[in-house]
Amino acid sequence: MSDRFYSDARLYDRLFPGGEPAVEFYRAAARRQGGTVLELGCGTGRKLVPIASDGHPCTGLELSPAMLDEARRRADERALAVEWVQGDMRDFDLGRTFDVVIVAANSLLHLHETADLLRCLRAVRAHLAPGGRFVLDVWNPDVRRLAAADGVRRTRDALSFVHPDRGAVRVDVAETYDAAAQVTRGTWFFSADGQPDFLVAPLELRSIFPQELPTLLSLAGLRLVERFGDWSGRPFTGDDPIQLCVCESD
């Protein structure tokens, strides 16, 4: 994971605002299952805090101290008792099981090696209560976009935002795709008036292809029950931008 990319939690939340359909999907999944909820790679708590507000006992595990501090602040503002744990999703033991385990917002894609993915998924399996559900979302790799990753720095207009201190912030990204590793290697550049490249951060994310995902889950003792292509619950097709998966123990 890029420590620098996640070093400013509030900047991160401004970079990726909204997300209400995803939040509502995960809230609905927790309501259907009931019980306790664990989110791995919980970030700033944008999904877990609303779930906790519905009355579910919640635990969030996150590697970045900055992101975890913002999650604590968000929960404290709402007087919600959420357990926050700093830890690595590849190697954790909380000593109990959960009715719902979540890995949202491409967090799983920070694990580049197959061995690390399996370590994480097997840890999920060990923390899943009998009859529990594992819910995750990752993007559906677009081979045309991957092939177009030529390393040229380009402005991402859709990602521009206004910072309360810096004013308008422009975001540029340069990416290449390592086909052998299935990893997109990017550098993100954040600039404001009079502050060119005030933050330059690497971000490297793996791709997990649709036929690969069920195999990884199976090797970890998990079974794919449902796969959706959007937050409305429409069945997944190869052209969909995301793989939204509901899993259970084998």
Image: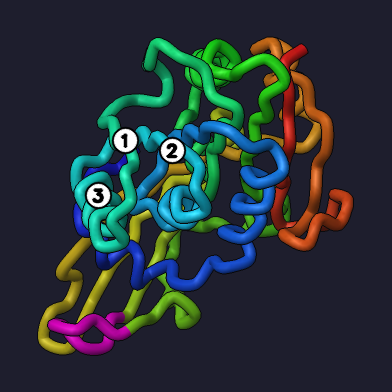
Q: Nearer the viewer, residue 49 or 87?
A: 49
Residue 232 screen position, x and y as percent = 78, 62
- What colouring does the structure picture have? rainbow
Earlier sequence position, callout 2 versus callout 3: 2
Residue at which label 1 appears? 83
Tag 2 and tag 1, C-beta contact below 8 Å: yes
Q: Residue at x 26, y 70 (%)?
A: 190
The residue that appears at 24% across and 55% down in the rendered structure is 76
Tag 1 or tag 2, which sits nearer the N-term? 2
Q: What secondary structure is marked by label 3? A: helix
Q: Is residue 21 above or below residue 143?
A: below
Q: CA distance from mark 1 to mark 3?
A: 9 Å
**Residue 99 belongs to magenta span:** no
Residue 2, position in %: x, y? 30, 43
Query: Which residue corresponds to mark 2?
Result: 58
In the image, residue 157 lies at what x, y percent? 46, 82
Number of numbered markers: 3
Is residue 101 rendered to the left or right of residue 189?
Answer: right
Residue 72's mark? 3
Residue interval drawn in magenta: 162-169
Q: CA distance from mark 2 to mark 3?
A: 12 Å
Q: Against 164, is 117 above or below? A: above
User: Is the residue marked by circle 1 packed among few (<14), some (14-19), or many (20+) residues within 10 Å?
Assistant: few
> Which quadrant would residue 98 be assigned to in this image?
top right
Q: Which mark is residue 32?
A: none
Would residue 163 be counted in the magenta stretch? yes
Marked residue nearer the N-terminal end (1 or 3) = 3
Magenta stretch prevailing secondary structure: strand
- Asked if residue 5 shows in the view, the reply is no
Say what amino acid the circle numbered 3 marks.
Answer: Arg
Q: Is residue 196 above or below residue 142?
A: below
Tell me the element at label 2. Answer: strand
